[in-house]
Amino acid sequence: MKKVILLVLLLSMVLPAAVFGASQEISVSIDGVKLQFSSKPIQENGTTLVPLRTIFEGLGASVKWDAKTQTVKASKNGVNIAITMGQKFAIKDGNKIQLTTKPRTILGVTYVPLRFIGESFGSTIEVHGKEINIVSPVPPSFEYGAKDNSAQTTTPPAQAPNPSTVPSTSTTSVQEIGKLSNRVVYIETYDASNKVLASGSGVVISSDGKIITNYHVIDEAASVKVEFNDQRSFTTSIILSKDESRDLALLKIPATNLAAVTMGDSTTLQLGEEVVAIGSPLGFKNSLTSGVISQTSRNVQGQNYIQISTPIDHGSSGGALFNMKGELVGITSALIESSASINLAIPSSDVKAFLAKPQVEQKLSPSVQQKPSTGSTGKAMDSKALEDYLNKNYGSLSFKGVDLDFDWDVMTSSDGKRFLIGGTMSDGMQWADWADKQEENGMAFPSLILYMSDELKDKLHLTDTFFSLYLNVHLSKYPSSFPAESISREGSGYRLDYNFIYGSVDYKSGYLFYNLDPTDEDSIQSVEID
């Protein structure tokens, strides 16, 4: 999806300065590992309130934000909780729990009560002055570091070490990180004539065959060969998602039961922290190099990167950057030709936001993305031609009293029968006005999909189209009114990449199908069309 900039100002309740002043020294740790908050925790009425996203991610809970009801829902190990902003109670597994202090949004940051969340998931809260430690109910996982649990009454039975994984310690050796090379692959791309185009690297992010890499590695490719360090190889022409401006692509290979990486939090990286890169520089497969974080946030050509001293080269693109806990904290992407060893990686926070976007199986190469339908000229319409047509004729339009600007991007489904059309807005005030219309009647967003579908049907005779609409913006404040999975840290602020609706018209049945909450596949709605 092509990226454009959207500005949305989200300001809410402001607490007196004294509240912030009283909480500046509060530190929160999970099993001894200090959390790095984008905004400082605060205390009110004896209750510590912390930024929503960091605490849930730190505890390993899945979280969903409902902007309409201002409610956050989280789950972990079968425990489900729901907290609504401004309400002095919460819901845990269907039971109403009274809170001592209301959760609320302050200057765009959503704060929630720490003790309630930690204890709901079975943790113990230890308070020593301004230092708060959350102790897990079981020995901490590899992801959050290890501590001495000898004082605990329950001790898990000893198990033989598994050589395919890294030991559960807070930090480990470069040699142990090297065992994760089975999660990093060598990539070779081919054009439609089966001629080699380029080579690079990729990272296994799920056991069912999803491989993430840089978009520039697979750009213009008709097929891709993915090779593991044990000589297994798979060929694919399927891409599940792409982001050209952020230089990320998600491939799908026909494999299962793969060893996948554990995703880390790039926002907690520290200057000088040791990191390890694994990739295939210059075609030398699964090469390991080590170095340090030279800069946690480096802006290059408008994009945020992690700057590292870890040596990489051509072919390292799409490879893995690990911290010393064996977590993926970046995708190695570029180097700047210099004696200073300036190398760049895309932060895992951006990777998480990219992976949260809808994934649809599509063909790789524009040369094979042909559409059997014909336009008004009678000639075959392919994805590039349709993309040009949309940007020329519908890049700017006035729709029901609101001016809307879009940047259109088009691909085809894997079977070549449907156009997948993405539209990204570029004006925040326009979106805000349009969102107001949506609040008024509930159909402002869906009706545009119907309008655009009808336009393509009437003017180009295209009836199999699927629309997905996005926002994309850099914000100085955390935009807590949007789903957490659509927000990533970038520079001194945040990147909002928000898919707010998708849908299509089924002209045979006479219904418009749409989803205003694309993160929930069960939220699809339908309305009969005239």
Image: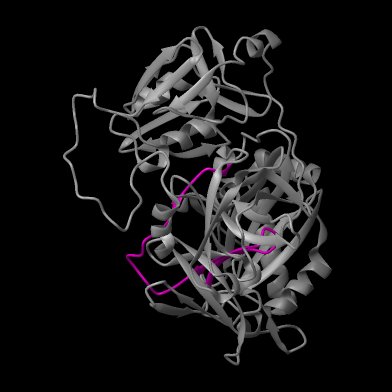
Where's residue 229, x and y in %? 41, 71
Front-most of residues 71 and 245: 245
In which quadrant will I find the N terminus? bottom right
State the residue lying farthest toward the front: 339
Q: Which residue lies furthest to the left in this view?
A: 157
Please give the name of the residue rendered at 58% of the width and 51% of the height, measured from the top-left corner. Answer: 291
Of residues 457 and 146, which is closer to you in this image? Answer: 146
Please give the name of the residue rendered at 75% of the width and 41% of the height, measured from the top-left corner: 432
Residue 64 horizontal/vertical position (percent): 49, 40
Residue situated in front as seen by the camera: 398 or 82: 82
Region of the chain picked out in magenta, as a range: 239-266
Residue 371: tell me if it is visible: yes
Asked where in the image residue 493 lies, by quadrant, the reply is: top right
Horizontally, residue 525 falls left or right of residue 461, namely left
Q: In this view, does 435 lie to the left or right of 97?
A: right
In the picture shown, does residue 368 fall above or below 305? below
The image position of residue 133, as x and y in percent, is 42, 21
Q: Is residue 264 magenta?
A: yes
Specify the quadrant that holds the C terminus.
bottom right
Foreground of the two, 252 or 99: 252
23 lies left or right of 147? right
The total number of labels drawn is 0
Q: Residue at x 77, y 87 (%)?
A: 377
Q: Kindly indicate the quadrant of the structure image that contains residue 502.
A: bottom right
The quarter of the picture where residue 213 lies is bottom right
Report the colour scheme. Answer: one colour
Task: List x then y, in percent, for residue 179.
Answer: 38, 59
Identify the residue at horizontal 44%, vertical 73% (top origin).
Answer: 253
In the rendered image, the vertical position of residue 30 relative to residue 156, given as above or below = above
User: On the picture, is 210 further left or further right than 425?
Assistant: left
Membership of 353 in magenta stretch: no
Residue 89 visible, this orientation? no
